[in-house]
Image (cartoon, rainbow, N blue to C red):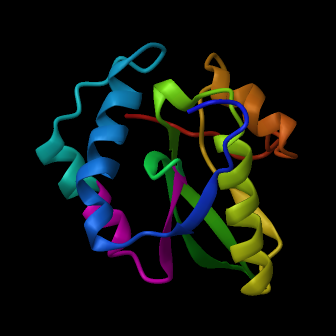
């Protein structure tokens, strides 16, 4: 992917799975994540996310090549709904080329069409994604703490 290419954002289709799974595993096996995903575990995981009510997956394509994806779902929170971003990744070869921005614009357009204004997600403070999300209008919450037991 070159800087000049246009990134198309569209809904996931079943034929996207091979590229989506390979992209997911490739993105997360590298630093800073260093995860141990396999194609099989990624398939189960992303399939589970797609099974959540009111979920959607958007894929990013440039020059007919898969370059990223996001999976998210709408959920009711008190008296309004919000979009919870479950996964958001860009293929390593396409990072820093506008793919993430295009995916974020795709989520925001989806949310606006659904009448939802709030987007929420979890990320680590010590990874580049943190700065990316801040640059796209996200802020740290002040009341909730993510806990692992």
- Determine whether, in the image, residue 72 is placed left or right of residue 118: left
Please identify the residue farthest to the left as the structure is shown: 40
Residue 75 drawn above or below residue 122: below
Q: Quadrant of residue 145?
A: top right
Q: Residue at x 32, y 22 (%)?
A: 29
Q: Nearer the viewer, residue 135 or 11?
A: 11
- Foreground of the two, 85 or 79: 85
**In the image shown, does 54 or 96 lie closer to the viewer?**
96
How many marks the image carries: the answer is 0
In the displayed structure, would residue 53 be above or below residue 4?
below
Can residue 142 be seen at all in this image of the molecule?
yes
Q: Residue drawn 69% across and 56% down?
A: 120
> Based on the displayed image, in which of its 4 quarters is residue 108 positioned?
bottom right
Locate residue 75: give its quadrant: bottom right
- Where residue 14 sits in the image (x, y, percent)? 28, 72
Q: Is residue 143 left or right of residue 35?
A: right
Q: Is residue 79 visible?
A: no
Percent across and percent down for residue 20 are: 34, 50
What is the span of residues highlighted in magenta in the rendered image?
Answer: 46-61
Residue in view at x 28 percent, y 47 percent: 21
| Residue 126: x %, y % from top left | 63, 16
């Amino acid at each position: 992917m070159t800087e000049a290419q246009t990134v198309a954002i569209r809904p996931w289709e079943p034929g996207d799975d091979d590229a989506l799974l390979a992209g997911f595993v490739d993105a997360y096996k590298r630093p800073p994540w260093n995860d141990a995903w396999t194609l099989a575990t990624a398939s189960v995981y992303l399939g589970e996310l797609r099974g959540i009510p009111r979920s959607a997956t958007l894929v990013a394509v440039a020059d007919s090549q898969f370059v990223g994806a996001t999976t998210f779902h709408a959920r009711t929170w008190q008296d309004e709904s919000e979009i919870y971003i479950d996964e958001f990744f860009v293929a390593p070869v396409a990072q820093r080329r506008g793919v993430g921005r295009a995916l974020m614009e795709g989520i925001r357009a989806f949310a606006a069409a659904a009448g939802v204004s709030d987007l929420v997600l979890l990320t680590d403070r010590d990874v580049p994604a943190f700065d990316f999300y801040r640059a796209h209008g996200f802020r740290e919450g002040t009341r909730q703490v993510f806990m692992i037991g």
